[in-house]
Amino acid sequence: MIPPVLVELARQFGFLSFLAIGGVNSLIPEIHRRVVDVQGWMTNAEFAQAFAISQASPGPNMLIVSVIGWKVYGFLGALVATVAICLPTSVLTYGIAHVWDRFRGAPLRAAIQRGLAPVTVGLVLASGYVLAQTTDDGWVSYALTAATALLALNTRRHPLWFLAAAAVLGALGLA
Amino acid sequence: MRENTPSTGTAPASAGELFLGFLKVGLSGFGGVLPFARRMLVEDRRWLDEREFTEVLSLSQFLPGPNIINVAVIVGNRFRGPFGSLSAVLGLMLMPFLIVLALAALYSHFDTLAAVRGATAAVSSAATGLVIATGLKMARPLLGTPWQVAIGLLGFVALAIARVPLLWALLVLAPLAIAIAWATRERRAR
Protein backbone atom coordinates (compact mmCIF):
# COMPACT_ATOMS: atom_id res chain seq x y z
CA MET A 1 0.00 0.00 0.00
CA ILE A 2 1.50 3.33 -1.07
CA PRO A 3 1.29 5.99 1.67
CA PRO A 4 -1.24 8.66 0.60
CA VAL A 5 1.25 11.44 1.29
CA LEU A 6 3.63 10.02 -1.34
CA VAL A 7 0.82 10.00 -3.87
CA GLU A 8 0.06 13.61 -2.95
CA LEU A 9 3.75 14.59 -3.34
CA ALA A 10 3.81 12.98 -6.79
CA ARG A 11 0.54 14.68 -7.74
CA GLN A 12 1.55 18.16 -6.52
CA PHE A 13 5.02 18.25 -8.05
CA GLY A 14 4.04 16.35 -11.19
CA PHE A 15 1.47 19.07 -11.88
CA LEU A 16 3.89 21.88 -10.97
CA SER A 17 6.39 20.45 -13.43
CA PHE A 18 4.17 21.63 -16.29
CA LEU A 19 3.86 25.15 -14.87
CA ALA A 20 7.61 25.66 -14.59
CA ILE A 21 8.21 27.96 -17.53
CA GLY A 22 11.59 29.58 -17.23
CA GLY A 23 12.73 27.01 -14.69
CA VAL A 24 11.95 26.22 -11.09
CA ASN A 25 13.01 29.68 -9.86
CA SER A 26 9.73 31.06 -11.18
CA LEU A 27 7.78 28.36 -9.33
CA ILE A 28 8.71 29.44 -5.80
CA PRO A 29 5.51 31.39 -4.99
CA GLU A 30 3.34 28.52 -6.19
CA ILE A 31 5.39 25.88 -4.34
CA HIS A 32 5.17 28.02 -1.20
CA ARG A 33 1.41 28.47 -1.61
CA ARG A 34 0.82 24.73 -2.00
CA VAL A 35 3.36 23.38 0.49
CA VAL A 36 2.89 25.92 3.31
CA ASP A 37 -0.59 27.40 2.84
CA VAL A 38 -2.63 24.59 1.29
CA GLN A 39 -1.01 21.29 2.36
CA GLY A 40 0.54 22.56 5.60
CA TRP A 41 3.55 20.28 5.06
CA MET A 42 5.97 22.81 6.52
CA THR A 43 6.06 26.21 8.22
CA ASN A 44 7.34 29.45 6.73
CA ALA A 45 10.59 29.04 8.64
CA GLU A 46 11.06 25.47 7.42
CA PHE A 47 10.41 26.61 3.86
CA ALA A 48 13.10 29.25 4.22
CA GLN A 49 15.50 26.63 5.60
CA ALA A 50 14.72 24.26 2.72
CA PHE A 51 15.46 27.07 0.28
CA ALA A 52 18.76 27.88 1.99
CA ILE A 53 19.82 24.21 2.05
CA SER A 54 18.99 23.79 -1.64
CA GLN A 55 20.95 26.92 -2.53
CA ALA A 56 23.96 25.83 -0.49
CA SER A 57 24.16 22.60 -2.46
CA PRO A 58 25.67 22.22 -5.94
CA GLY A 59 23.33 21.39 -8.78
CA PRO A 60 20.09 22.60 -10.34
CA ASN A 61 17.77 25.13 -8.69
CA MET A 62 15.04 22.53 -8.38
CA LEU A 63 16.67 20.82 -5.39
CA ILE A 64 14.33 22.69 -3.03
CA VAL A 65 11.75 20.17 -4.21
CA SER A 66 13.97 17.30 -3.01
CA VAL A 67 14.35 18.92 0.43
CA ILE A 68 10.59 19.44 0.72
CA GLY A 69 10.00 15.79 -0.18
CA TRP A 70 12.60 14.72 2.38
CA LYS A 71 10.91 16.83 5.05
CA VAL A 72 7.53 15.31 4.25
CA TYR A 73 8.45 11.62 3.92
CA GLY A 74 12.21 11.06 4.28
CA PHE A 75 14.36 9.63 1.48
CA LEU A 76 11.39 8.11 -0.33
CA GLY A 77 9.56 11.43 -0.21
CA ALA A 78 12.61 13.19 -1.67
CA LEU A 79 12.87 10.63 -4.46
CA VAL A 80 9.17 10.83 -5.34
CA ALA A 81 9.11 14.65 -5.31
CA THR A 82 12.28 14.89 -7.43
CA VAL A 83 11.13 12.36 -10.02
CA ALA A 84 7.72 14.03 -10.11
CA ILE A 85 9.15 17.48 -10.94
CA CYS A 86 11.49 16.02 -13.62
CA LEU A 87 9.74 13.14 -15.33
CA PRO A 88 6.51 14.52 -16.86
CA THR A 89 8.20 17.43 -18.62
CA SER A 90 11.20 15.28 -19.60
CA VAL A 91 8.82 13.02 -21.52
CA LEU A 92 7.18 16.09 -23.07
CA THR A 93 10.57 17.53 -24.02
CA TYR A 94 11.63 14.20 -25.48
CA GLY A 95 8.53 14.17 -27.68
CA ILE A 96 8.73 17.79 -28.78
CA ALA A 97 12.49 17.91 -29.48
CA HIS A 98 11.83 15.72 -32.51
CA VAL A 99 9.40 18.11 -34.17
CA TRP A 100 10.79 21.44 -32.91
CA ASP A 101 13.64 21.70 -35.40
CA ARG A 102 11.15 21.71 -38.26
CA PHE A 103 9.71 24.98 -36.95
CA ARG A 104 13.02 26.79 -36.94
CA GLY A 105 12.43 30.38 -38.00
CA ALA A 106 8.65 30.00 -37.96
CA PRO A 107 7.02 33.32 -36.95
CA LEU A 108 4.77 31.62 -34.39
CA ARG A 109 7.76 30.08 -32.63
CA ALA A 110 9.41 33.49 -32.43
CA ALA A 111 6.18 35.07 -31.12
CA ILE A 112 5.84 32.38 -28.44
CA GLN A 113 9.40 32.95 -27.24
CA ARG A 114 9.06 36.75 -27.29
CA GLY A 115 5.72 36.58 -25.49
CA LEU A 116 6.84 34.21 -22.75
CA ALA A 117 10.03 36.15 -21.94
CA PRO A 118 8.32 38.94 -19.93
CA VAL A 119 5.96 36.44 -18.25
CA THR A 120 9.02 34.57 -17.00
CA VAL A 121 10.62 37.78 -15.74
CA GLY A 122 7.47 38.65 -13.77
CA LEU A 123 7.42 35.19 -12.22
CA VAL A 124 11.10 35.20 -11.23
CA LEU A 125 10.77 38.64 -9.61
CA ALA A 126 7.63 37.45 -7.82
CA SER A 127 9.72 34.54 -6.52
CA GLY A 128 12.25 37.02 -5.16
CA TYR A 129 9.48 38.98 -3.46
CA VAL A 130 7.83 35.94 -1.87
CA LEU A 131 11.21 34.58 -0.78
CA ALA A 132 12.10 37.89 0.84
CA GLN A 133 8.82 37.85 2.73
CA THR A 134 9.36 34.26 3.79
CA THR A 135 13.02 34.36 4.73
CA ASP A 136 13.74 37.92 5.82
CA ASP A 137 12.81 39.15 9.28
CA GLY A 138 14.09 42.51 10.37
CA TRP A 139 16.05 45.14 8.53
CA VAL A 140 19.40 43.32 8.70
CA SER A 141 18.21 40.39 6.61
CA TYR A 142 16.43 42.71 4.13
CA ALA A 143 19.66 44.68 3.84
CA LEU A 144 21.57 41.43 3.21
CA THR A 145 19.13 40.50 0.44
CA ALA A 146 19.38 43.96 -1.15
CA ALA A 147 23.18 44.06 -0.88
CA THR A 148 23.51 40.61 -2.47
CA ALA A 149 21.18 41.58 -5.32
CA LEU A 150 23.15 44.79 -5.99
CA LEU A 151 26.52 43.01 -5.85
CA ALA A 152 25.31 40.21 -8.14
CA LEU A 153 24.03 42.80 -10.63
CA ASN A 154 27.18 44.90 -10.64
CA THR A 155 30.06 42.44 -10.27
CA ARG A 156 31.15 39.28 -12.05
CA ARG A 157 31.94 37.33 -8.91
CA HIS A 158 30.76 33.74 -8.63
CA PRO A 159 27.45 33.59 -6.66
CA LEU A 160 28.96 31.07 -4.26
CA TRP A 161 31.16 33.85 -2.82
CA PHE A 162 28.09 35.79 -1.73
CA LEU A 163 26.50 32.74 -0.11
CA ALA A 164 29.76 31.88 1.67
CA ALA A 165 30.16 35.44 2.95
CA ALA A 166 26.56 35.44 4.16
CA ALA A 167 27.07 32.10 5.93
CA VAL A 168 30.07 33.51 7.81
CA LEU A 169 28.19 36.67 8.80
CA GLY A 170 25.21 34.61 9.92
CA ALA A 171 27.28 32.11 11.90
CA LEU A 172 28.93 34.99 13.75
CA GLY A 173 25.49 36.36 14.58
CA LEU A 174 26.06 39.50 12.50
CA ALA A 175 23.22 38.93 10.04
CA MET B 1 17.21 14.21 -39.83
CA ARG B 2 19.69 16.90 -38.88
CA GLU B 3 18.90 16.47 -35.21
CA ASN B 4 20.84 13.21 -35.28
CA THR B 5 23.78 14.58 -37.20
CA PRO B 6 25.41 17.48 -35.36
CA SER B 7 27.38 19.56 -37.84
CA THR B 8 30.63 19.85 -35.95
CA GLY B 9 32.40 18.47 -32.94
CA THR B 10 32.67 14.96 -31.63
CA ALA B 11 29.77 12.81 -30.52
CA PRO B 12 29.93 11.12 -27.13
CA ALA B 13 30.98 7.51 -27.61
CA SER B 14 28.50 6.00 -25.18
CA ALA B 15 25.67 6.60 -22.76
CA GLY B 16 28.29 6.22 -20.03
CA GLU B 17 30.16 9.20 -21.41
CA LEU B 18 26.94 11.24 -21.37
CA PHE B 19 26.41 10.19 -17.76
CA LEU B 20 29.91 11.29 -16.76
CA GLY B 21 29.73 14.57 -18.67
CA PHE B 22 26.52 15.59 -16.95
CA LEU B 23 27.71 14.23 -13.61
CA LYS B 24 30.44 16.86 -13.73
CA VAL B 25 27.92 19.57 -14.65
CA GLY B 26 25.72 18.63 -11.69
CA LEU B 27 28.64 19.02 -9.32
CA SER B 28 29.96 22.29 -10.77
CA GLY B 29 27.26 24.87 -10.39
CA PHE B 30 25.68 26.57 -7.43
CA GLY B 31 22.33 28.32 -7.82
CA GLY B 32 21.89 27.15 -11.38
CA VAL B 33 24.15 25.07 -13.58
CA LEU B 34 23.38 26.27 -17.12
CA PRO B 35 26.70 28.13 -17.56
CA PHE B 36 28.54 24.95 -16.61
CA ALA B 37 26.45 22.87 -19.00
CA ARG B 38 27.52 25.24 -21.77
CA ARG B 39 31.17 24.96 -20.82
CA MET B 40 31.04 21.14 -20.75
CA LEU B 41 29.05 20.71 -23.98
CA VAL B 42 30.66 23.41 -26.13
CA GLU B 43 34.18 23.99 -24.80
CA ASP B 44 35.36 20.87 -22.99
CA ARG B 45 33.75 17.94 -24.81
CA ARG B 46 32.70 19.73 -28.01
CA TRP B 47 29.55 17.69 -28.36
CA LEU B 48 27.76 20.83 -29.61
CA ASP B 49 28.90 24.02 -31.28
CA GLU B 50 27.85 27.45 -30.04
CA ARG B 51 24.86 27.75 -32.35
CA GLU B 52 23.58 24.25 -31.55
CA PHE B 53 23.83 24.95 -27.84
CA THR B 54 21.85 28.19 -28.19
CA GLU B 55 19.11 26.29 -30.04
CA VAL B 56 19.00 23.53 -27.44
CA LEU B 57 18.87 26.15 -24.69
CA SER B 58 16.08 28.20 -26.25
CA LEU B 59 13.96 25.08 -26.69
CA SER B 60 14.70 24.03 -23.09
CA GLN B 61 13.63 27.42 -21.80
CA PHE B 62 10.53 27.45 -23.94
CA LEU B 63 9.32 24.05 -22.70
CA PRO B 64 8.04 23.67 -19.14
CA GLY B 65 10.13 21.90 -16.50
CA PRO B 66 13.59 22.51 -15.08
CA ASN B 67 15.64 24.00 -17.96
CA ILE B 68 18.81 22.05 -17.30
CA ILE B 69 16.89 18.76 -17.19
CA ASN B 70 15.43 19.61 -20.60
CA VAL B 71 18.94 20.31 -21.93
CA ALA B 72 20.07 16.88 -20.68
CA VAL B 73 17.04 15.16 -22.26
CA ILE B 74 17.58 16.82 -25.66
CA VAL B 75 21.36 16.33 -25.78
CA GLY B 76 21.17 12.74 -24.51
CA ASN B 77 18.52 11.88 -27.07
CA ARG B 78 20.35 13.57 -29.92
CA PHE B 79 23.37 11.32 -29.50
CA ARG B 80 22.13 8.11 -27.90
CA GLY B 81 18.33 8.06 -28.08
CA PRO B 82 16.07 7.53 -25.07
CA PHE B 83 18.76 5.67 -23.13
CA GLY B 84 21.07 8.62 -23.70
CA SER B 85 18.43 10.99 -22.27
CA LEU B 86 18.07 8.79 -19.21
CA SER B 87 21.85 8.57 -18.69
CA ALA B 88 22.29 12.33 -19.00
CA VAL B 89 19.48 13.15 -16.56
CA LEU B 90 20.63 10.54 -14.03
CA GLY B 91 24.20 11.81 -14.29
CA LEU B 92 23.03 15.38 -13.77
CA MET B 93 20.80 14.67 -10.77
CA LEU B 94 22.53 11.87 -8.86
CA MET B 95 25.19 13.75 -6.89
CA PRO B 96 23.26 16.99 -6.22
CA PHE B 97 20.32 14.92 -4.98
CA LEU B 98 22.49 12.95 -2.53
CA ILE B 99 24.41 16.05 -1.42
CA VAL B 100 21.31 18.14 -0.74
CA LEU B 101 19.81 15.32 1.34
CA ALA B 102 23.05 14.97 3.28
CA LEU B 103 22.95 18.72 3.94
CA ALA B 104 19.31 18.54 5.03
CA ALA B 105 20.11 15.65 7.40
CA LEU B 106 23.12 17.49 8.79
CA TYR B 107 21.04 20.60 9.27
CA SER B 108 18.27 18.81 11.15
CA HIS B 109 20.97 17.32 13.38
CA PHE B 110 22.61 20.64 14.23
CA ASP B 111 19.74 23.08 13.98
CA THR B 112 19.80 23.77 17.71
CA LEU B 113 23.16 25.53 17.34
CA ALA B 114 22.77 29.29 17.07
CA ALA B 115 25.63 29.55 14.57
CA VAL B 116 24.03 27.00 12.23
CA ARG B 117 20.64 28.68 12.41
CA GLY B 118 22.24 32.08 11.84
CA ALA B 119 24.29 30.86 8.87
CA THR B 120 21.25 29.18 7.28
CA ALA B 121 19.06 32.25 7.67
CA ALA B 122 21.75 34.49 6.20
CA VAL B 123 22.36 32.14 3.24
CA SER B 124 18.63 32.17 2.62
CA SER B 125 18.53 35.99 2.61
CA ALA B 126 21.55 36.21 0.30
CA ALA B 127 20.18 33.55 -2.05
CA THR B 128 16.95 35.56 -2.24
CA GLY B 129 19.05 38.49 -3.40
CA LEU B 130 20.51 36.26 -6.14
CA VAL B 131 17.03 35.35 -7.37
CA ILE B 132 16.08 39.04 -7.50
CA ALA B 133 19.30 39.84 -9.39
CA THR B 134 18.54 37.07 -11.90
CA GLY B 135 15.06 38.49 -12.48
CA LEU B 136 16.42 42.01 -12.98
CA LYS B 137 19.10 40.79 -15.40
CA MET B 138 16.44 38.98 -17.42
CA ALA B 139 14.31 42.15 -17.36
CA ARG B 140 17.01 44.46 -18.80
CA PRO B 141 16.68 43.52 -22.50
CA LEU B 142 12.87 43.85 -22.28
CA LEU B 143 12.75 47.37 -20.81
CA GLY B 144 12.59 49.09 -24.21
CA THR B 145 9.34 47.34 -25.13
CA PRO B 146 6.38 48.81 -23.20
CA TRP B 147 4.03 45.84 -23.59
CA GLN B 148 6.71 43.47 -22.30
CA VAL B 149 7.20 45.69 -19.26
CA ALA B 150 3.42 45.69 -18.70
CA ILE B 151 3.18 41.89 -18.97
CA GLY B 152 6.11 41.46 -16.59
CA LEU B 153 4.50 43.81 -14.06
CA LEU B 154 1.15 42.05 -14.37
CA GLY B 155 2.82 38.69 -13.74
CA PHE B 156 4.67 40.07 -10.73
CA VAL B 157 1.56 41.63 -9.17
CA ALA B 158 -0.58 38.53 -9.83
CA LEU B 159 1.89 36.14 -8.22
CA ALA B 160 3.60 38.26 -5.56
CA ILE B 161 0.88 40.63 -4.34
CA ALA B 162 -2.47 39.05 -5.28
CA ARG B 163 -1.09 35.48 -4.81
CA VAL B 164 -3.17 34.17 -7.69
CA PRO B 165 -2.66 30.44 -8.38
CA LEU B 166 0.05 30.12 -11.03
CA LEU B 167 -2.13 28.08 -13.39
CA TRP B 168 -4.73 30.87 -13.69
CA ALA B 169 -2.08 33.54 -14.08
CA LEU B 170 -0.41 31.57 -16.88
CA LEU B 171 -3.70 30.76 -18.62
CA VAL B 172 -4.42 34.50 -18.88
CA LEU B 173 -0.94 36.00 -19.32
CA ALA B 174 0.73 33.52 -21.69
CA PRO B 175 -1.90 33.66 -24.49
CA LEU B 176 -2.19 37.44 -24.07
CA ALA B 177 1.57 37.97 -24.30
CA ILE B 178 1.96 35.60 -27.25
CA ALA B 179 -0.93 37.34 -29.05
CA ILE B 180 0.73 40.76 -28.57
CA ALA B 181 4.07 39.37 -29.73
CA TRP B 182 2.33 37.93 -32.79
CA ALA B 183 0.50 41.17 -33.56
CA THR B 184 3.70 43.23 -33.35
CA ARG B 185 5.92 40.78 -35.27
CA GLU B 186 6.00 42.67 -38.61
CA ARG B 187 7.32 45.94 -37.25
CA ARG B 188 10.05 44.09 -35.44
CA ALA B 189 11.17 42.14 -38.47
CA ARG B 190 12.05 45.25 -40.53
Image (cartoon, grey):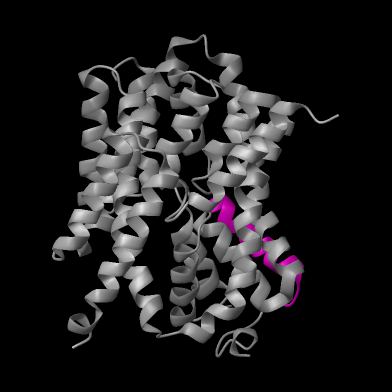
Nearer to us in this view, A111 or B96 = A111
Which residue is found at the position 47% from the left and 59% from the top? B34
Question: Residue B21 appears at what percent x and percent y?
Answer: 63, 64
Q: Is residue B96 above or below residue B15?
A: above
Split into 4 quadrants, where in the image is the C terminus of chain B? Answer: bottom left
Side of B146 where B127 appears, left or right: right
Q: Is residue A36 above or below residue A90?
A: above
> Can residue A38 be seen at all in this image of the molecule?
yes
Which residue is found at the position 72% from the left and 62% from the top? B87
Which residue is found at the position 37% from the left and 70% from the top? A112
Nearer to us in this view, A119 or B170 = B170
Side of B17 where A33 appears, left or right: left
Q: Is residue B163 above or below residue A118?
A: above
> Can residue B130 be seen at all in this image of the molecule?
no
Q: Is residue B35 above or below residue B130?
A: below
Nearer to us in this view, B117 or A12 = A12
The residue segment tinted magenta is B13-28
Which residue is found at the position 64% from the left and 50% from the top? B93
Q: Is residue A44 magenta?
A: no
